[in-house]
């Protein structure tokens, strides 16, 4: 296994090598297996269409995401951004492409403050100030340029076709609309009112919905390239929507023209004899390495599954406190990331005890490792996050893999409409509250900066360097907990992909532990944690959207999250 293992040892990688064989090739046959799992069947169909044509997993991911932007506009789309973690089996390398939205040049640290108070979330969410430069289209281009095999126009074709011919409104999309009409501006804003509430009534599940504006935008991008999006008429429409009063924002054509996808380090860390590889900040992928590393210490003496669940809860509590305190935009702030992921630090951190009902404070890896405090760098974090994100996982017939999480932040983003899609409200992912004492959280707003994200597209490799798992989820601040459940569930609790996804979600951040009790053994877990002294909040449902693939020697085991409306499909290809 070549240089994967030695590069893993470096711990902090721009690209790390991997297996040289396809992900799953049954012995003695020429068959190769590919798989796609995502939050909507149309998106999975688009991915499979690309994989059947011999496309790279990246081609399939772009095709699927362009469809998701159409059929699942509440979650992500062309007006938003996302992260793509790519395993390229030919180059035996991992790449992290950061298509996160960036703050306009006119953004200010206190743009969500008024009279010394932070504006309420509702007002911030639906203001033009919340709109960052959309990154999705540039992410398509950057990943396609580097990895794609099919023609650029070909991968956008399924979404253009579906937008032109129409698609049936899904129950989840339809369910949002009456609620949004009551609680937000979706039924009032120009564009969104006409599209989602034709004739003043919300679309119903099963209605045929066409989106010629979306088809036109993607057709122009397909024919003219991404400059058709980041300059000219489409960019002008985006800027006008972001600046529209009331509560207009600062986004300009110059911000649009300056947008760049960032190629960032892939970070890997040990879990047992495996390696978890994930996206670096501004993503929170590093929390996966922290949770798994802490869990390993905390569960070392577990006598039973209840002890293991309690260890998982404590690992999350400690990792969240560190993530919340230290993570932000790495181009703008100092993040002691290699220290936070250092096995010595994690071993020490696992010994720090907090009462079950107490709020764990951040650790100090600088002090632990170098007798030089890092904790005082930042004011306490004040970031809040809402719901509106999607995740897809794909493995192609050559063993290339994509883990992609994309977002518009809150449901339907800022609810401002431009050229066939909603614009994000990703700027509310910053810490909006500005401390009066002049100190700044790591995730404070600044011009051009990218807000911290909880999105954590991740992959796991075994001791041979072979890919074991592709995972990720939406869910705002709960993403690290949701994703970690699949890693620990499959790799320690012995679950299949679907069992791990179905397992009740457990989210332990701050003083509360949320436990999803709608499925077994949720109630038993909640009762046990209460008996151990934790502040347990029982939840009927959680907002995960885990779409994962587990790789076995001669098969792929995929799962779609039943909490959303996705599916998993497998494709057998012959050479
Ligand atoms: O990037 C982030 O962390 C958030 N914008 C994600 C929001 C989210 O996952 C909501 N999901 N349901």
Image (cartoon, rainbow, N blue to C red):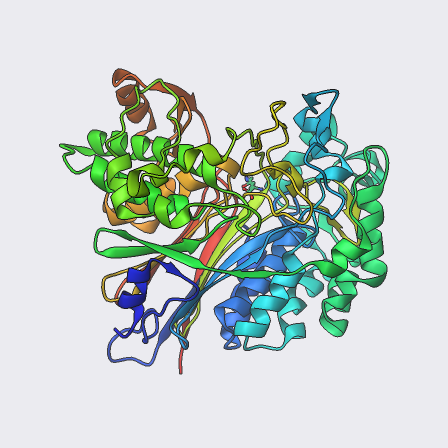
Q: Is residue 554 visible in this depiction of the protein?
A: no
Give the total of numbered labels.
0
Quarter the N terminus occupies: bottom left
Q: x, y (%) of residue 24? A: 32, 69
In which quarter of the view is residue 387 placed?
Answer: top right
| Residue 246 placement, left or right of 134 | right
| Residue placed most toward the observer, 197 or 322 | 322
Compared to residue 516, the image places residue 244 above or below, namely below
* Image-quadrant location for residue 158: bottom right
Ligand 1 resides in the quarter of the picture at top right
Instruction: Give above or below for 132 relative to 410.
Output: below
- Residue 551 or residue 376, whichever sits in front: 376
Residue 201 seen from this side: yes
Where residue 484 sits in the image (x, y, percent)?
Answer: 36, 43
Identify which residue is drawn at 30% across, 56% down.
Answer: 275
Q: Residue 491, relative to residue 148: is it above or below? A: above
Query: At 55% across and 57% down in the image, what residue appears?
Result: 98
Left or right: residue 199 compared with residue 400: right
Residue 193: x percent and y percent?
Answer: 81, 39
Identity of the residue drawn at 42% across and 34% down:
375
Residue placed at 72% from the left, 67% from the top?
A: 226
Image quadrant occupied by the C terminus: bottom left
Note whether 456 is above or below 213 in the view shown: above
Between residues 502 and 426, which one lies in front from this camera angle? Answer: 426
Quarter holding residue 185? top right
* Image-based side of 430 in relation to 211, left or right: left
Foreground residue among 199 and 525: 525
């Amino acid at each position: 296994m070549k240089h994967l293992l030695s590069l893993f040892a470096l711990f902090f990688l721009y690209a790390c090598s991997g297996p040289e064989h396809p992900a799953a090739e049954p012995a003695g046959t020429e068959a190769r297996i590919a798989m796609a799992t995502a939050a909507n069947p149309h998106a999975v169909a688009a991915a499979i269409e690309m994989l059947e044509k011999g496309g790279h997993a990246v081609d399939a991911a772009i095709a699927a995401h362009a469809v998701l932007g159409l059929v699942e506009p509440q979650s992500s789309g062309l007006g938003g951004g996302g992260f793509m973690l790519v395993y390229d089996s030919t180059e035996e390398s991992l790449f992290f492409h950061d298509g996160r939205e960036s703050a306009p040049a006119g953004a200010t640290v206190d743009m969500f403050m008024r009279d010394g108070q932070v504006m309420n979330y509702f007002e911030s969410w639906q203001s033009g100030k919340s709109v960052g430069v959309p990154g999705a289209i540039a992410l398509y281009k950057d990943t396609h340029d580097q990895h794609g095999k099919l023609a650029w126009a070909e991968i956008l074709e399924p979404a253009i076709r579906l937008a032109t011919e129409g698609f049936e409104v899904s129950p989840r999309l339809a369910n949002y609309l009456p609620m949004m009409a009551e609680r937000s501006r979706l039924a009032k804003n120009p564009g969104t009112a006409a599209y989602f509430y034709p004739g003043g009534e919300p679309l119903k599940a099963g209605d045929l919905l066409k989106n010629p504006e979306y088809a036109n935008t993607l057709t122009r991008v397909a024919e003219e390239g991404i400059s058709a999006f980041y300059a000219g008429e489409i960019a002008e429409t985006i800027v006008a929507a972001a600046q529209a009063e009331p509560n207009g924002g600062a986004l300009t054509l110059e911000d649009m023209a300056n947008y760049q996808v960032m190629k960032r380090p892939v970070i890997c860390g040990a879990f047992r004899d495996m390696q978890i590889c994930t996206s670096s900040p501004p993503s929170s992928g590093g929390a996966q390495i922290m949770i798994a590393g802490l869990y390993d210490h905390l569960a070392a003496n577990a006598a039973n599954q209840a002890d293991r669940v309690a260890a998982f809860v404590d690992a999350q509590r400690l990792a969240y406190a560190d993530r919340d305190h230290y993570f932000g935009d790495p181009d703008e702030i100092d993040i002691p990331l290699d220290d936070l992921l250092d096995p010595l630090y994690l071993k020490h951190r696992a010994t720090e005890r907090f009462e079950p009902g107490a709020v764990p404070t951040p650790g100090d890896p600088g002090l632990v490792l170098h007798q030089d405090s890092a904790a005082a760098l930042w004011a306490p974090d004040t970031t809040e996050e809402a719901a509106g994100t999607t995740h897809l996982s794909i493995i192609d017939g050559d063993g290339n893999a994509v883990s992609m999480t994309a977002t518009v932040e809150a449901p339907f983003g800022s609810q401002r409409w431009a050229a066939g899609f909603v614009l994000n409200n990703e700027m509310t992912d910053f810490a909006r509250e500005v401390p009066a004492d002049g100190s700044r959280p790591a995730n404070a707003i600044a011009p051009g900066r990218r807000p911290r994200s909880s999105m954590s597209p991740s992959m796991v490799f075994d001791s041979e360097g072979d890919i074991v798992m592709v995972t990720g989820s939406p869910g705002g601040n709960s993403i690290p907990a949701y994703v970690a459940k699949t890693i620990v569930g499959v790799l320690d609790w012995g679950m299949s992909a679907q069992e791990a996804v179905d397992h009740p979600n457990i989210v332990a951040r701050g003083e509360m532990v949320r436990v999803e009790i709608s499925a077994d053994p949720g109630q038993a877990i909640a009762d046990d944690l209460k008996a151990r002294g934790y502040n347990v909040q029982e939840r009927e449902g959680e907002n995960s959207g885990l779409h994962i693939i587990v790789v076995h020697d001669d098969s792929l085991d995929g799962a779609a999250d039943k909490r959303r409306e996705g599916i998993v499909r497998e494709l057998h290809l012959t050479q």
